[in-house]
Image (spheres, helix red, strand yellow):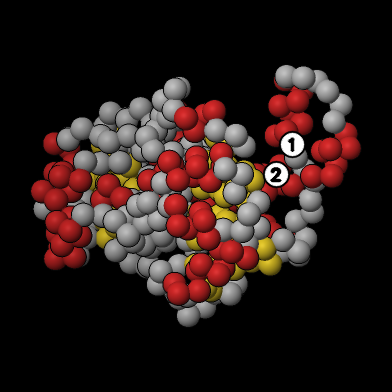
Amino acid sequence: MTRLTIWTNALLTDEARRALTEATQAHRLLIAEQPPDVLAKADRDPGVSGANVVFGQPDPADLVDSEHLNWVQISSAGYTRYDLPELKSAFLSRKVLLTNSSQVFAEPCAEHLMAWLLADGRQLYHAFEEQKESRAWSQNALREKCRLLANQTILMVGLGSIARRLIELLAPYRVRIQGYRRTPQPESPIPIVAAEKLPGALAGADHVVNILPESSSTNGFFETARFAQMRKGARYYSIGRGTTTDQGALIGALRSGHLEAAYLDVTDPEPLPPDHPLWSTPNCYITPHTGGGHTTESIRTVEHFLNNLRRFEQGTPLIDRVW
């Protein structure tokens, strides 16, 4: 087995760092300064230049300049920072592999969405607001608003690993599910909506789930016209990237009553300033980009990397391959 130089700045717990160190004893492991959070942009690091394998959130410029790289694994699901023409060109010309950590975050994000769908149906947010404020016993009013998921229509926009896991979680609930993606794939567990049919699908959905990644084609994807196409009383959920939602348009759709509720795990910017109007918009419920979070996140991220490292050593296909 070839001895590799592995550079990492992945945000790891002590347990995860020990697991990574122990599992890579046959290689040379360089542990760089960790960023403050999983998506923070790292400073440039000269250690990347001598690495064969990089794991974490490196500076893209370091990757472009490095001539020894064979494989890079990003420690997040999103890779917008690395989706650059100059980086892709350099990687393709030098046959450098790029993988991400989608598999790590699919389960918690799908569960986050599932929790929202159930909390919305059972009116948990409204009951909690009442508990904090008036403490009225609005039993009849809340019971009348509670809904079953059965026979509801859910439109998923963006059909990556999160959507695939959410489809599995929804299986017992007898919901109708449709999906939209810009480039449909031949095999799909749910009906796929073509671009020209998207307005009709939006109009027919009770729940619209936005799981789009950030890109030039998805920025502002949900804007005034698309919110207007949604059926009155629909719910909107966003767990991909905040830039895919025109937040001013969303505020307008909520304040007018056209949308019943919105559930956001991602915003633009992040952190969302305390005085941002989204915080006080009626029926807008925000979690601070915690959808992918879980107590075993760090160790699962390392395990995913080590699984791919074994595959890399053996010359077998890597999981979550981007390029």
Q: Nearer the viewer, residue 85 or 253?
A: 253
Residue at the far bottom: name it. 186
Which quarter of the rendered picture does the N terminus lie within?
A: bottom left
Q: Secondary structure at mark 1?
A: helix
**Which residue is depicted at the point 77% across and 19% down?**
134
Query: Measured from the top left, where is residue 213 in percent x and y?
Result: 40, 54
Residue 273 showing in the rendered view: yes
Q: Is residue 78 above or below residue 137?
A: below
Residue 29 showing in the rendered view: no
Q: Nearer the viewer, residue 231 or 42?
A: 231
Task: Specify the amino acid type for callout 2.
Answer: Asp
Task: Specify the amino acid type for callout 1.
Answer: Leu
Q: Residues within 10 Å of mark 1 (few under 14, many from 20)?
A: some
Q: Residues within 10 Å of mark 2 (few under 14, many from 20)?
A: many
**Which residue is depicted at the point 67% across and 48% down?**
117
Residue at the far front: name it. 256
Q: Which mark is residue 120?
A: 2
**Which residue is depicted at the point 74% across and 36% down?**
124
Residue position for label 1: 124
Disc 1 and disc 2 in contact, CB within 8 angstroms:
yes
Q: Is residue 96 above or below residue 120?
A: below
**Which residue is depicted at the point 36% across and 56% down?**
218
Please give left or right for residue 202 compared with residue 186 in the image: right
Q: Nearer the viewer, residue 155 or 201?
A: 201
Query: Measured from the top left, where is residue 147 in percent x and y?
Result: 79, 50
Q: Secondary structure at mark 2?
A: helix
